[in-house]
Image (cartoon, rainbow, N blue to C red):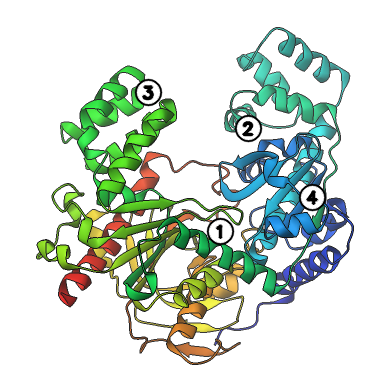
Amino acid sequence: MIRTVPTSGNEEINLYIRTYYSLLRSTREVQIKTLIEAHKRINSALHVLADKPQIDVAALLYTSMRLPECIDQTSLVIMGQSERVFSQHGYPEVERWQQVSAPGRRRRSFYNGQDTLAVYIASRSDIDDLIPTLTAYQMERRKLYNRLNKTAVLDALQAWQDAGVEEPGKNELKWLAKQANLSSKELKQLLQTWGKGGLARLQAMAQHKHELSVRSLAGSLTDYKRATRQWWRNTERALPDIAFEERPIYFISSNTHTMANLLSGYALCQEETLNQFINARGSDLLRREYQDILAQNVPSSLENFLYYALKKYEAVYPQSVRARLEHERQTGLVRIPSEHAFDIEMQVARLDQLNVMGMDRRLRVPGMQKLARSQALILNIDYPLGMAAYQVLTEIARNIETVRGVYIMGKAATLNGRVGDVMIPGVVHDEHSLNTYLFRNCITADDVAPYLVYGTVMDNQKAITVPGTFLQNEGYMSVFYEEGYTDMEMEAGPYLSGIYEMARPKRHPYNEIVDLHHVPFPIGILHYASDTPLSKGANLGAQNLSYFGMDPTYASMIAILRAVLQMEIGSL
């Protein structure tokens, strides 16, 4: 059993959670500033300077990437599970508002163009993620205001704005950074992260105090279940020719690009087009990397590089996406965007329609020709946040006949590795249910290592599912680290709670050691390291995985898809 986390760790986090849930019960909006003191007391590993006057650039970057840019004009954030919930509380047409998004967090959101942001939430995990993020953002933005709201700075920013300056010169950057008590490197990183218009955004922060309020419109378990059911019915309506209750299913939780790229092979047959794009529009770094791969000067995967180049190409030529989607459909893969609910895309792949010779060569296993007789489907979802994983998996399970495997690929923080490593757990402690799940992971290090170039694979690991990214601190982490838990993430525990209910005739237990070794289908869980939280201030707000971040995701998905294909071929 895991020892109790000391008061300086877990108790302050629990107090913070209780504080904002009690406030959110109010029928009126709650000002974010009422949460600041509780937020400071948790000593979050993602917000190490929360209680200091110094600007926490890492925290500001992290929160900026996870909130839509309109947050700077927003004074009220409203949270609801469905369009019906918003309508019942006086917001009848939120989906007619401007749809907005954040680069680092997938959450369906709509902005009314004035001062209100409507956010769809899939589970309480969205609240545990959004509230600390809003609080940290307001705190750090206020620090910027306090530093920069002075005549000399405001005049300089306005002069640059009038002159059309988008990026200050070296001397101007150094002066401005000094005014904010930042290094030139930190300020440049902020402006680059904000992209075009970053200087104007900084000017707005220097001119105006920013006060955020939040209101939760509903929060019952029934509301969450109703929203999840609506999400699944959207899938059924999109594919009326498939009787899901009659087909064997392989369930995968990953992302929207890895499985589609590997199975369809679209980027591979577009190499010449991508080559021309790289030479004409690509950065010097992109061109050099491509030439080094072709000359075998670096060990990088050509396939992975082409998948990355395709993403860049489609960003420049968005009209080209239609051709890719059509190619995917011809190879048996259909994407189903979510509608009127939380933002989780579904992908359905028919194994009997796969183009065996066109897919990524790393997937080819003996007996592939037998797949033409398969009736099985792969359901791949864009991985949900926290407890939404439990709701989605249990909803799918109650609407299908047979599950032949559950495979989870997600991001995690590593306490002993490096960004880009892959961790394969056999034990998961879930902070939601307080259960410790023991299971046989059907994926091993040997399944991943041949396809991983830059990182290390570690199997037989112990993972902990935390309630939120901000809701962890050094005291909290150190206790689990002493117990051998080195893999911190947000979905494995809820998924395993759902798996328990798929194999047992009762609801998952609470605060127990749960043995899942006898579940009648394979379980594969892989996490790629995206953060190293014991390195203070080193999080994904302060770095970019970029092309090299694709290495662990594709290596993990190759291992998962090979396991699926081998199992299905064996069953035939």
| Circle 3/circle 1 CB separation < 8 Å | no
The outermost residue toward the top is: 163
Disc with the residue nearer the chain's start (3 vs 4): 4
Q: Secondary structure at mark 4?
A: loop
The residue identified by callout 4 is 91
Residue 190's mark? Answer: 2
| Residue 104, image x, y percentages | 56, 45
Select label 1 or label 2 by which is in front.
2
Disc with the residue nearer the chain's start (3 vs 1): 3
Q: Secondary structure at mark 2?
A: helix
Cα–Cα span, label 3 and label 1: 33 Å
Vertical position of residue 155 compared to residue 512: above or below: above
Q: Nearer the viewer, residue 327 or 313?
A: 327
* Observer able to see residue 448: no
Identify residue type, mark 2: Leu
| Residue 395, image x, y percentages | 51, 73
| Residue 194, image x, y percentages | 62, 31
Vertical position of residue 425 compared to residue 259: above or below: below
